[in-house]
Amino acid sequence: MEAAHSPWRPPLIWRAALLLARVVVGMLARLEVTGDIPARLRGGPLILAANHISPFDPIVLAAACRARRLAPRIMATGGLFRAPLIGAAMRSAGHIRVDRGTNGVHRALDAAATAVAAGAPILVYPEGRIGLDPGIWPERGKTGAARLALASGAPVIPVAQWGSHEVLPYRAPKGMLRGIARALVRRPTVRVHFGDPVELDDLTHAAPGAARRATDRIIDALTDTLAPLRPDEPDRPRHVDPGRPVDTSRAHRRHRAAG
């Protein structure tokens, strides 16, 4: 069992996977990583909150994290853990299983809280799924990441990414080979930016509505961090995936700060 005073050390299999991710992304795209984790936050508990736009995101984010000397534990869907080989690798690497729609969600938050207390950085997708906004902007988030941040006091860093949707289609593995072949030829630019910490200090964990307000701030921060990565695509993406459904039921409305 991990002790709160002992920082988490990423297993060898995860360090090797981070290196492999950098190689794979380099073959399929031109990776640009900007921003960084403030020095004062390194070595302590940390929550990386990323937008989710493609099945290729985990590989892109692993490559970007390696570029910033980070080895986060990932909160990932339970389906990955049920896969024979991938599941074993995920467990060995120390990642955290999230069974959405079941009681396992609460177990995942408990496991994440223990990991954060042990000093591990955690990577989470606050939207809870690959976003289906027609403009591929961040959707209204689930409250899990915010509740974890409020309960633990760990800072939240928005990590915005753009371009991974041009590598793998939404319905991968369907169409995956075609997407990879296209990427090998075109090598699209994939951008990742580590933004400024989200301000949550004025929110109290037990206060009514605090988790929703914190979630909205995290999604706002992700939206603001993403915008400079796609200056020529402010409304709709140039690359359109015909197999990607559209769902506006979780559209996020930007919450402006008072004053």
Image (cartoon, rainbow, N blue to C red):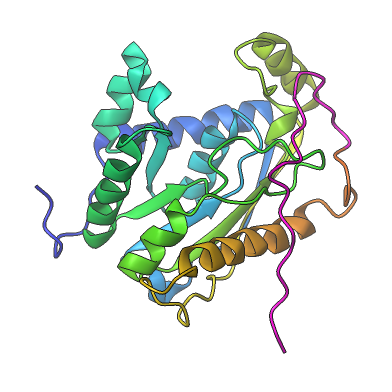
Identify the main secondary structure in magenta: loop
Task: Write down the region rendered in magenta.
Answer: 238-259
Considering depth in this image, is 73 or 248 the residue closer to the camera? 248
x and y percent of residue 152 in the render? Answer: 31, 66
Picture layout, residue 188 above or below residue 201:
above
Q: Position of residue 61 (x, y in %)?
A: 53, 42
| Whether residue 39 is situated above or below residue 80 in the rendered picture | below
Q: Quadrant of residue 56?
A: top right
Tell which residue pokes out farthest to the front in this image. 208
As for residue 255 lying within the magenta part, the answer is yes
Query: Which quarter of the rendering shows the C terminus?
Result: bottom right
Residue at 29% in and 58% down: 116
Q: Observer-nearest residue: 20 or 48?
A: 48
Residue lying at 35% horizontally and 40% vertically, measured from the top left: 105
On the image, the x and y values in percent for residue 35 come to: 60, 63
Q: Is residue 235 found left or right of 110 in the rendered image?
A: right
> In terms of image quadrants, where is residue 164?
top right
Q: Is residue 91 magenta?
A: no
Work out whether 62 lies above or below 55: below
Q: Is residue 183 left or right of residue 98?
A: right
Q: Position of residue 21 (x, y in %)?
A: 49, 32
Q: How many numbered marks appear?
A: 0
Does residue 157 appear anywhere in the picture? yes
**Left or right side of 155 for 88:** left
Residue sitting at x 59%, y 28%: 55
